[in-house]
Image (cartoon, rainbow, N blue to C red):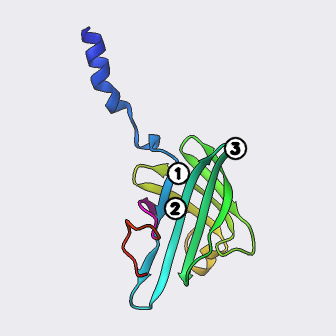
Amino acid sequence: MRFLLIFLLLIPLSVRAEDAPITGTYSSLYYNEEGGDLLGAEVTIIKRAKGYEAEFQVAQGGRPDKVTVPVSVKGNRISFTIPKPEDGSGFYSGKIIKAGLLLYDGSDLSALTQRNPSKPFLLKRKCSYWAKCGKHPG
């Protein structure tokens, strides 16, 4: 009986940040009041019958188009490719952590934003910019 109690108490300690669910919305989209622009990126990962899909959008000033692509998932690591001629076209890979998605940007945009593709950027796990739970201009 003691062994069972100790085992049950230790279960929460064995849950790692890497065990965060894959599905969800990861976003850095924000409204830049100074320039009146929408900036950032948003990825929503959805589980489908045939695997995972990502809804991807990137904003560089205007309302972004949403692209849906298949996602490769291995443990807490993901990868997907945005086809040309879409904004942000290129290969992305990342790691799901408790705080969100650490995304490596191998896209055409990394050159424009002078982002180092060998360093990930964090898209926080949160409501979509477009959802009612977020605060944004209509």
Dots 2, 1 in contact, CB < 8 A? yes
Query: Is disc 2 surrounded by few (<14), some (14 to 19) or many (20+) residues within 10 Å?
Result: some
Q: Residue furthest top?
A: 1
Describe the element under mark 1 as helix, strand or loop.
strand
Question: Disc 1 and disc 3: Cα gap in Å?
Answer: 21 Å
Residue at the spot of label 3: 50
Answer whether residue 29 is visible to the viewer in this image. Answer: yes
Residue at x-position 55% and y-position 84%: 62
The N terminus is located in which quarter?
A: top left
Residue at x-position 52% and y-position 49%: 23
Describe the element under mark 2 as helix, strand or loop.
loop
First in residue order: circle 3 vs circle 2: 3
Q: Which residues are magenta?
A: 123-129
Q: In which image quadrant can residue 137 be found?
A: bottom left
Residue at x-position 44% and y-position 90%: 36
Between marks 1 and 3 in the image, the one whose residue lies nearer the viewer = 3
Describe the element under mark 3 as helix, strand or loop.
loop
Answer whether residue 114 is visible to the viewer in this image. Answer: no
Q: Give the image location of residue 113, x and y in percent.
A: 56, 79
Point out which mark residue 120 bears. Answer: 2
Q: Residue furthest right?
A: 84
Point out which mark residue 83 bears. Answer: none
Q: Give the image location of residue 40, x and y in percent.
A: 50, 74
